């Protein structure tokens, strides 16, 4: 695998190695297993991005749980459109249950806030989030982000589920958008 990769004329530089990602997911899985062991939670996978993180994490969880896949979208290209669209596919009754949202990335936190509101309205007992990556400098939300794999700068990244207009999700490492003097 090369150190740089291009999509749509933009260069991305290898940033977090697959081995580091696997180690962090192992750490998160241990923490999450400890927290939810006796609670029969519902794990909410936000499609499409979280699917790869979710598969890697779920294999390492050692407690009984159910999963539900939902679809939310707020981005177009490399810049936020600023609006969160609807939520499709919540097919488990979350009333009275603990819910753990799985995300590939939390950026401004708008998607998380939106999901949190919908799950609260649906009667979830407790709502937490586990995300592979968080951009603390972009985060504009008061809700706590409970489980974080990597805190990253406010730069666009792809790989491990993260995409640029649909591409890059299947990269095993995470790549960061190169600034003009790095290209
Ligand atoms: P938020 O609602 O601003 O937290 O953004 C969450 C969504 O924006 C994620 O689920 C991604 O789809 C997208 N997003 C934010 N930053 C990035 C990035 O660096 N790479 C790819 N997608 C991103």
Image (cartoon, rainbow, N blue to C red):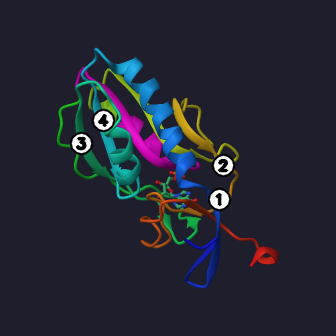
Per the rendering, the mark at residue 43 is 4
The percent position of residue 176, horizontal first and vertical second, equals: 64, 63
* Front: mark 1 or 4: 1
Instruction: Looking at the picture, tell me which residue is in the foreground, 164 or 73.
Output: 164
Magenta highlight range: 95-118
The percent position of residue 36, horizontal first and vertical second, equals: 35, 20
Q: Secondary structure at mark 1?
A: strand
- The disc, 2 or 4, on the residue closer to the chain's N-terminal end is 4
Establish whether ligand 1 lies closer than 8 Å to the Cβ of label 4.
no
| Residue contact between numbered discs 4 and 3, judged by CB atoms under 8 Å | yes
Q: Examine the rendered structure and indicate whether residue 135 appears above or below residue 85.
A: above
- The disc, 3 or 2, on the residue closer to the chain's N-terminal end is 3
Please rate how many residues cluster around mark 3, counting C-alpha atoms within 10 Å: few if below 14, some from 14 to 19, many from 20: some
Q: Which residue is mark 3?
A: 68
Q: Which residue is mark 1?
A: 15
Is residue 90 visible in the rendered image? The answer is yes
| Residue contact between numbered discs 1 and 2, judged by CB atoms under 8 Å | yes
């Amino acid at each position: 695998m090369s150190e740089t990769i291009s999509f749509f004329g933009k260069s991305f530089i290898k940033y977090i190695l697959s081995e580091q990602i696997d180690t962090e997911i192992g750490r998160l899985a241990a923490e999450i297993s400890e927290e939810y062991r006796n609670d029969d939670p519902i794990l909410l996978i936000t499609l499409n991005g979280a699917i790869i993180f979710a598969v890697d994490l779920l294999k390492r969880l050692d407690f009984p749980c159910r999963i539900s896949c939902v679809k939310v979208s707020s981005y177009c290209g490399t810049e936020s459109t600023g609006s969160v669209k609807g939520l499709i596919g919540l097919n488990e009754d979350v009333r009275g249950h603990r819910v753990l949202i799985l995300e590939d990335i939390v950026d401004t936190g708008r998607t998380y806030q939106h999901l949190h509101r919908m799950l609260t309205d649906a009667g979830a007992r407790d709502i937490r989030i586990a995300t592979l990556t968080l951009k603390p400098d972009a985060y504009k939300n008061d809700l706590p982000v409970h489980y974080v794999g990597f805190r990253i700068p406010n730069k666009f990244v792809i790989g491990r589920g993260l995409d640029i207009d649909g591409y890059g999700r299947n990269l095993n490492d995470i790549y960061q958008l190169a600034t003009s003097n790095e290209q």
